[in-house]
Amino acid sequence: MLPGWSYVACGFLLWAQRPANRLGPIMAGVGMLWLLGRAGQMSSVPVVWTAGIWLTDLWVTGLILFLLAFPTGRLRRGFDWVIVGMSLVVTVPLELLWLAFLDDGQGRNVVLVVVNDDAAHGVDRLQRILFTLGALLLVGSLARRWQRSTGPARRQTIPVLVGGFAILLQSVSWMVFSFGSASHVLDSSIRIALVAIPAAVLYVMAQARMARAGVADLVVELGQTPTPARLRDALANALGDPSLEVAYRADAGDTFVDSNGMAMELPALDSGRAVTMLERRGVPVAAIVHDAALLDDPGLMASVAGAVRLAVENDRLNAEVEAQLEEVRASRARIVEAGDRERRRVERDLHDGAQQRLVSLSLELRFARARLDEHADPALRQSLERAAGEAMAALAELRELALGIHPLVLTESGLSEAVESLADRSPVAVTVDVGDDRYPPDVEAAAYFVVSEALANVAKYARAASAAVRVRRDAGALVVEVSDDGVGGADARAGSGLRGLGDRVAVLDGTLEVVSPAGRGTTVTARIPIPSPSHVSVPAL
């Protein structure tokens, strides 16, 4: 009973896995016919025994139908119907004709018309000849199908090949029996082959499940934007179809091109190749050209197509995000550039305007005081003296303000002297190691303001006895380091100054790092890429 139950179990499992496919019901039906036939032959009830004899041969027709319909559940060619028809002739009208002359010796044959051993033997021989001819046609058809198929289809034809071998063995066994011989080895081989068919079906089903599981690896493989060749290879590996091709829709019209941009014709419906379209928002963007056998597992193709759509959509979203980030970078650069330009304008206006006026006012006040004679009112003299002093103090404060906005010394003399001027004005002792090299104006400005803000924080919060400024070139970048021996504990996120410096440095694709362990001082390090010499514009001295 093992062959029958194996067919029933495998058939119901296949039916549950692919409810739209007819193979499951057909396979379960084959198993039921086998079981009913064997059970009927063991009965002493005439009607049941007669039905058992008939079903014992009819199940072979069901098996032939299953093999020819595998894996789609449908017969593909008219020649397949001829083979099934020959089997039906053998198992229905000829079987009933044989039973009409057969005397089983126990009176169990309910369709017996007249006992005629010669007629029964002749019909039986005709059945065996026709069945053998049908078996040969079946094996030839299956072999032709296997020869014309590619990788995926060939893997799916394993149960078919095993079944064809079993049918061929069965026909040989019947021909041997018709000549009055029997072979136990042959009968055992038939049983093994029959049981091997459900095992082969389970193997094909397991392969399909593994292929679906491989879609997860395909998603990972396509995580990075794939090249056309890499995309094709990834799909071919996931589907097990080395002949797979990917066609891309041309910009104009409905034509498709391959990965090299050459025009590509999609295969016709009867070519044995199939096309799975990839669409975005209802518009075809590409097509996967693959073995038509892969359509027998629609879930697999849907999963693969979904993975490719996901990769394409991720690629599109990444491109949009990158474009937005690039626009943000460009916008931030424009803001910083506009701010620096405005700083230079304000500094220039202060230097050429207000500072010059204050200098002139101070000179005029001193000149007026000098022209007073010795009999002049002392209060007037003191008032002129105070006014001159206030003018000089205002001038000093204005110069300090101008340095904070944008130091003229940075533009005229470079980073070294600008940093030296910051160190001279710092209330904390500062050692400077800068060098005399010049750098692009935006790099120098960023480095200057890093030092300026860091030293201002040292003076305000660090309670440090000393600080050090070091500027050096390292691997195509300018490294600015400001350290102190203060209390530490600084947080770059707590204040707007260092955050603003981080934004300024980031505009130039640089980085700002603050290391400030409690009680062990603070080190601010900025790394600013230096453009290639062809892009460096150093202002004239």
Image: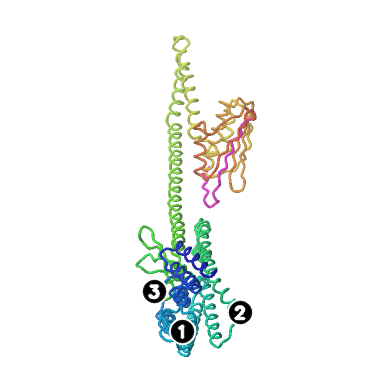
Counting residues from the N terminus, which is met first, the one under dot 2 or under dot 1? 1
Q: Give the magenta range.
A: 521-541
On the image, numbered disc 3 is attached to which residue?
Answer: 269
Disc 2 and disc 1 in contact, CB within 8 angstroms: no
Seen from the viewer's position, the closer of residues 77 and 237 is 77
Counting residues from the N terminus, which is met first, the one under dot 3 or under dot 2? 2
What is the quadrant of the N terminus in the image?
Answer: bottom right
Seen from the viewer's position, the closer of residues 426 and 133 is 133
Above or below residue 218? Residue 51 is: below
How packed mark 1 is, by other alpha carbons closer than 10 Å (few <14, some 14-19, many 20 or more), is many
Cα distance between the residues tagged 3 and 1? 51 Å
Count the labels in the image. 3
On the image, numbered disc 1 is attached to which residue?
Answer: 102
Residue drawn at x 53%, y 52% as measured from the top left? 534
How packed mark 3 is, by other alpha carbons closer than 10 Å (few <14, some 14-19, many 20 or more), is few
Counting residues from the N terminus, which is met first, the one under dot 3 or under dot 1? 1
Residue 532 percent coordinates (x, y): 55, 51
**Which residue type carries mark 3?**
Leu
Cα distance between the residues tagged 2 and 1? 25 Å
Which type of secondary structure does the marked residue at label 3 adopt?
A: loop
Cα distance between the residues tagged 3 and 2? 48 Å
Assess whether residue 537 is covered by the magenta stretch. Answer: yes
On the image, numbered disc 2 is attached to which residue?
Answer: 184
Residue 162 percent coordinates (x, y): 54, 75
**Which residue type carries mark 1?**
Leu
Seen from the viewer's position, the closer of residues 267 and 482 is 267
Q: Is residue 517 left or right of residue 403?
A: right
Above or below residue 459? Residue 80 is: below
Residue 181 percent coordinates (x, y): 58, 86
Assess whether residue 201 is covered by the magenta stretch. Answer: no
